[in-house]
Amino acid sequence: MSVNPGDTPGDISSLMAQIGANASSAARELAVAAPAAKSAALAAAAKILKNTQTAILAANARDMAAGEQRGLTPAFLDRLELNETRIKDMADGVFAISELADPVGEIIASWEVPSGLHIQRVRTPLGVIGIIFESRPNVTADAGALCLKAGNAAILRGGSDSFYSSTAIHRALVEGLEQAGLPPAAIQLVPTTDRAAVGEMLGGLDGAIDVIVPRGGKGLVARVKAEARVPVFAHLEGICHVYVDKSADLEMAVAVTLNAKMRRTSICGTAETLLVDRAAIDTHLAPICEALMAAGCEVRGDETVVAMIDGAVPATKADWTTEYNEAIISVAVVEGVNGAIVHIAANSSQHTEAIIADDPVAVARFFAELDSAILMHNASTQFADGAQFGMGGEIGIATGKMHARGPVGVEQLTSFKYLVHGTGQVRP
């Protein structure tokens, strides 16, 4: 069904119910599909993405023009934009997922109990996964590919801003499924931007959807977590920190902090707050802040930072809990690793934190006492990404503590069941 943004099918409820039924049927097929068939579908889709680059770029240009006309922010437009490099990266990511080991059927654990029963814990697909996302059209490929590899059917609902781009990408995924003899309904894209479709998905589509994954702004994620009647893998914000310890190598501290903030300011792994050990302010603070400002980043600092750094502006209380998604960073001076831990624990969204240090004791404390999903040592927070973790890609970064945490890849998109083998045992 082809629907343009703003079009509203007469009965959204019936449309979504049919999508749910199709997904449930496809999920049953995928649960027993041969690993080779899933890999073949993804390898074919990766090739098609590259071969249809012109059509995808044309669709994206249409979305970009509409976004610029609506006055979308530069950060939003950056997430929306596709180019040859991003399409190649997207296709390479799909191919990388095709080559991952198939998780379905993996024996996680195996043991025997005194009764003689042999018990195995085995990975199984979750079933049907609903992904609701905004702006980033590459999520269409990442989410669809990961769900398929883990034996799940996917229902993708992109935002109106990326409607044409997502549709073009989805077409390549469906063609890959067809070439491999798998059901096209294994990866469905909701063909309308009517917000009623989101409500239907949050209701679970009469039991069809097993998990919802939102990727987008704070408003979207908050709504999903508040209204969903099925489990949710989500994070609200990426308020990530870089702490520079007194033991940090200065050159490394400058390079890592600059990359963590400025490589790409619109992604959730971007550093939003820099914390500098008070014992290092005479050596480290100015070089790092000056490098950031030279790259076009605004520095909002506490009293010490404003007093020491020309061009820094006073930070407000809100700055310590703000995900800027642009070239702005808040900077505070803290009393060693203990001060960093206290600040992060009070202000973090538990996404990603990094420590730049050569002192193993400071690193050990940072890792042990903070409870964010990802903790890094001497590395940029921008590595908080499933592909960079060797997962091929990710649906998102989960900051909750149940089932999935950190990059949500193929293993996180599975559950498990117990297989129990006996020799005629009966329980006394």
Image (tube, rainbow, N blue to C red):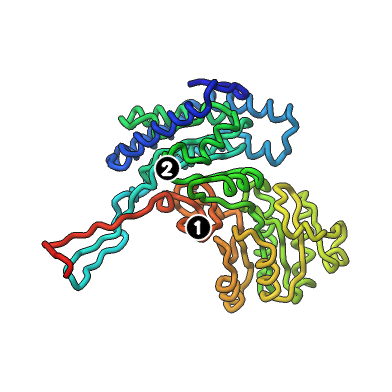
The single residue placed furthest to the front in the displayed view is 428
Q: In this view, does 118 lie to the left or right of 161?
A: left
Q: Is residue 171 left or right of residue 135?
A: left
The foreground one among 303 and 425 is 425
Which quarter of the rendering shows the C terminus? Answer: bottom left
Kindly identify the amino acid type of the residue bearing the numbered disc 2.
Cys
Pointer 2 residue: 147
**Gap between marks 1 and 2 measured at Cα:** 16 Å
State the SS at label 1: loop
**Residue 358, position as x, y percentages in the image:** 61, 73
Q: Which mark is residue 387?
A: none
The quadrant in which residue 282 appears is bottom right
The foreground one among 264 and 248 is 264
Pointer 1 residue: 405
Q: Which residue is drawn at 67% across and 66% down?
A: 344
Is residue 350 depicted above or below 8 in this figure?
Answer: below
**Residue 419, position as x, y percentages in the image:** 24, 57
Q: How many numbered discs, if any?
A: 2
The quadrant in which residue 291 appears is bottom right
Q: In this view, does 340 lie to the left or right of 46?
A: right
Is residue 242 depicted above or below 409 in this figure?
Answer: below
